[in-house]
Image: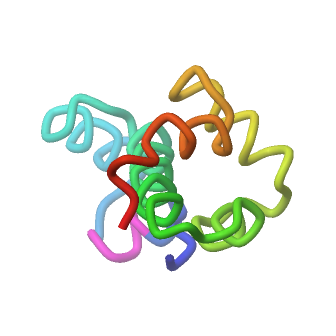
Amino acid sequence: MEDITISRLTAASGTSKSTLQRDMIDFTGMAPLQYIHYLRMNRATVLLMRRMPVADVAFSVGYNTISSFNRHFLSEFGVSPTQWRKEHESRLL
């Protein structure tokens, strides 16, 4: 996954940070950083379902450390990536 940043989003959209913030909230209901986090976590669940190792998932979705990924994943889903995969084993691809 390409590293998505606010700077890249403003450059791609040709808008200021404040306009991007307002437009993202209007369109998605989330601030840009929240939306980036949401995209990363959703992609992480897809990769976990494909049995990719957790460390590879973390780096693939843009986290520099496994601990940072684990912390954000736990915050989003209430369980660790490993536990999440165990709970969804019946649907693994």
Q: Quadrant of residue 63?
A: bottom right
Image position of 29 (left or right of 89)? left
The residue positioned 68% from the left and 34% from the top of the image is 80
Which residue is more in the foreground, 80 or 31?
Answer: 80
The total number of labels drawn is 0
Single out the residue that lies furthest toward the left.
27
How is the model colour-coded? rainbow
- Residue nearest the viewer, comparing 18 with 29: 29
Above or below, 21 relative to 6: above
Residue at x 72%, y 48% (from the top left corner): 69
Question: Is 25 displayed left or right of 1 in the figure?
Answer: left
Which residue occupies 15% across, 33% down?
26
Q: Which quarter of the rendered picture does the C terminus lie within?
A: bottom left
Where residue 52 sits in the image (x, y, percent)?
60, 71
In the figure, 40 relative to 19: above or below? below
Q: Is residue 64 above or below residue 27?
A: below
**What is the residue that sits farthest to the top in this orientation?**
78
- Name, please, the residue furthest toward the front: 90
Q: Nearer the viewer, residue 12 or 90?
A: 90
Task: Give residue 8's position: percent from left, percent from top.
Answer: 47, 72
Q: Answer left or right for 69 relative to 91.
A: right
Give coordinates of residue 40: x percent, y percent.
49, 55
Does the magenta-highlighted stretch encompass residue 11?
yes
Please tell me whether the stretch drawn in magenta is mainly helix, strand or loop.
helix
Q: Which residues are magenta?
A: 9-13
Q: Residue 85 at x, y = what percent?
A: 54, 46
The residue depicted at 85 percent of the width and 57 percent of the height is 65
Residue 64 within the magenta-colored segment of the rendering: no
Q: Is residue 20 left or right of residue 64?
A: left
